[in-house]
């Protein structure tokens, strides 16, 4: 190899890396909510989408299911494939209760550290497992940590999955989180049409952190009711359906 070719190879490698990592800009919430409303999960203005990540977890998910049943509310559960195969009965229980099943990947690893092929294999494995266990083909995909890559966008499209992140979260994964802090954080920037992210498992969070989300949930549902917003899964959220702010 000629020495003068080395800078060209370096520039090419840098360009490939930049393209792969470019979607990480969507991780910045305010920018995403403003410029990428569909990816952020902006839906119809009289509705709030309630979503949970990282389950199913036999130690915590049943408590969320019981509360949601008591309140007559359905949600979207973004399942990790490796968690789903450990609790297949719980996956079916979530689906049978009328909740929507979605894909959070096979393992909770940053996709920026994985190439296009590995990303595709991860998503396909998770999609197929979740579909088989729930009896329903999933529609939505949310990447671990909310960090997309070019490979993730390509894989999702090929697998018939639509990426969706969130407009509000509860920061319920930390050891400092409390029901009060989660409620305050979610409602600080929640609006009609928003998508809320909470966690029904502590498999990637501080031990028992899910209790802060569970404790905040009744007050959050009351807040939405007082604002006149219906609460439900993403399938009822009208993403990209022509509502104000929707992106095609």
Image (cartoon, rainbow, N blue to C red):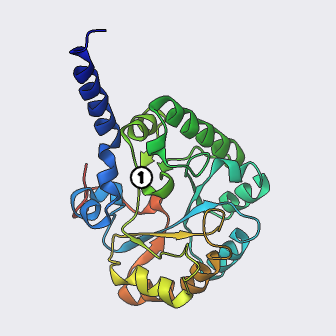
| Percent coordinates x, y for residue 98 in the rendering | 62, 63
Left or right for 27, reference 104: left
| Percent coordinates x, y for residue 226 in the rendering | 40, 90
Q: Residues within 10 Å of mark 1 (few under 14, many from 20)?
A: some
Residue 239 appears in the figure: no
Above or below, 138 against 73 in this view is: above
Q: Residue at x 55, y 72 (%)?
A: 173
Left or right for 159, reference 19: right
- What is the quadrant of the N terminus in the image? top left
Above or below, 165 against 218 in this view is: above
Residue at the far top: name it.
Answer: 1
Q: Residue at x 32, y 79 (%)?
A: 189
Residue 155 appears in the figure: yes
Left or right for 197, reference 29: right
Q: Residue at x 41, y 49 (%)?
A: 163
* Depth check, front residue: 243 or 130: 130
Residue at the disc numbered 1: 147
| Percent coordinates x, y for residue 97 in the rendering | 67, 65
Report helix, strand or loop for mark 1: loop
Residue at the far front: name it.
Answer: 3
* Depth check, front residue: 127 or 45: 127
**Label total for image:** 1
Above or below, 115 against 21 in this view is: above
Residue 213 quadrant: bottom right
């Amino acid at each position: 190899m000629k020495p003068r070719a080395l800078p060209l190879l370096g520039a090419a490698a840098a360009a490939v890396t930049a393209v792969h990592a470019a979607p990480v800009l969507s991780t910045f919430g305010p920018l995403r909510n403003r410029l990428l409303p569909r990816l952020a999960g902006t839906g119809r203005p009289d509705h709030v989408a309630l979503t949970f990540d990282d389950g199913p977890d036999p130690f915590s998910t049943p408590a969320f299911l019981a509360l949601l049943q008591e309140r007559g509310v359905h949600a979207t559960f973004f399942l990790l494939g490796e968690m789903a195969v450990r609790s297949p009965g719980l996956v079916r229980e979530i689906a049978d209760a009328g909740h929507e099943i979605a894909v959070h990947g096979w393992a909770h690893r940053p996709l920026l550290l994985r190439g296009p092929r590995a990303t595709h294999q991860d998503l396909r494995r998770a999609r197929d497992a979740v579909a088989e266990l729930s009896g329903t083909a999933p529609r939505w995909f949310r990447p671990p940590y909310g960090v997309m890559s070019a490979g993730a966008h390509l894989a999702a499209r090929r697998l018939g999955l639509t990426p969706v992140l969130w407009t509000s979260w509860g920061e319920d994964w930390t050891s400092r989180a409390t029901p009060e802090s989660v409620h305050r954080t979610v409602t600080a920037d929640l609006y009609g049409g928003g998508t809320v992210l909470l966690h029904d498992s502590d498999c990637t969070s501080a031990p028992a952190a899910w209790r802060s989300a569970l404790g905040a949930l009744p007050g959050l549902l009351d807040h939405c009711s007082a604002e006149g917003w219906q609460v439900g899964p993403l399938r009822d959220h009208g993403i990209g359906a022509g509502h104000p702010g929707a992106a095609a």
